[in-house]
Amino acid sequence: MWTLLIADDERTIREGIARSINWKRLGISRVFLAADGQEAYTLIKKERPDIAILDIIMPEMTGLEVISRIGKQSDRPQFVILSGYGEFHYAQEAMRHEVRDYILKPCDLEEIFTTIARVIQQIEEQQSIAAQHAHLESYVDLLEPRAQEQILRDFIIGNSPKNGKLFAEVFQQAGKTVQLLLFSFSDPDHFSNLPTLKRCIDNDAVITDWKFSAILRDGIVLVFNVEAESKVKAAVQEICQAAARLSIHGIRAAVSAEGPVEQLP
């Protein structure tokens, strides 16, 4: 349900609009009334209406001043202005304040109804787009680690062209010097434990600098910045201890020579 503010210093106009239109047909549950600009501003700040119909010329504060003071805050209402024929230059100024629509006086109730219906439709469309974007972003956040892991895997084992610059840009590590830490098992029968071992690696908090791991055939490779090299030994110990708690033993670890991320082996 929506909420609406009607602000006009002429009582017959604001109350006439409020009482003469069946707002429930538009899904509007509450209608607030303001007799001047200051009252309109106060109600907007307090009640946060979805839509505000403002007369251009009002005591205390004009409709434009109300809109200007509200600014571009994210929860501001969608503004519709009322203006007389001699006030059209004010209406033009209001449009520069991203006012959604304007209605010329004398007011036609059908036009007001149609205008507010159109504004509500625009709000619903904006909300739908925002929801789709949020859903897409959450999907991308879920997909991104898996996609990065596949890029790392393909790059190291050669399933894709060796484009080191692209690889570095994807991981936002261009120009960084890195090393590879490789984990595997002494007994090939334990290779089935690689996914569990990878979770132990990903959950390790010792290497706080950039790290990313991927399962490669019969092992797991972890890429880390050389600045974190002093922590690698502690990380290996923690990872082996975490794996042991899951009854996983016989882990081997080896560290590569250091080099630019673009030139990973």
Image (cartoon, grey):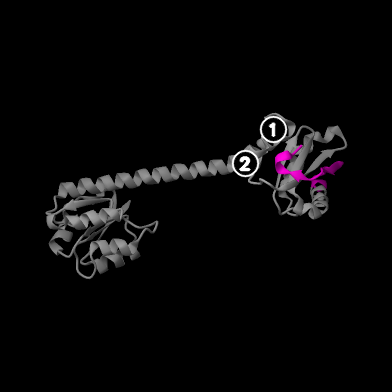
Q: Which residue is mark 1?
A: 162
- Which amino acid, by three-letter code, is at mark 1? Lys
Q: Is residue 216 above or below residue 117?
A: above
Is 214 situated left or right of 106 in this image? right
Residue at 74% x, 51% y: name it.
Answer: 204
Residue 50 appears at what percent x and percent y? 32, 55
Vertical relation: 169 (above or below) 91: above
Compute the Cα span from label 2 to label 1.
13 Å
Farthest residue to the bottom: give it.
Answer: 60
Residue 259 in percent (x, y) is at 76, 44
| Mark 2: secondary structure | helix
Whether residue 37 appears in magenta in the rendering, the answer is no
The residue stretch that appears in magenta? 243-265
Say the numbered circle drawn on residue 170: 2
For badge 2, the amino acid type reads: Val
User: Residue 252: horizontal and vertical position, in percent?
Assistant: 86, 42
Quadrant of the drawing holding the C terminus: top right
| Camera-nearest residue between 263 and 157 | 263
Residue under the image location 32 percent in, 65 percent down = 69
Is 146 positioned to the left or the right of 135 in the image?
right
Determine crowd level at label 1: few under 14, some 14-19, many 20+ residues with C-alpha closer than 10 A. some
For the residue pair 26 and 34, the one nearer the viewer reads as 34
Residue 7 or 153: which is nearer the viewer? Answer: 153
Decide if residue 249 is in sight here: no
As for residue 254 lying within the magenta part, the answer is yes
Which label's residue is closer to the chain start, 2 or 1? Answer: 1
For numbered disc 1, what is the local secondary structure?
A: loop
Q: Quadrant of residue 15?
A: bottom left
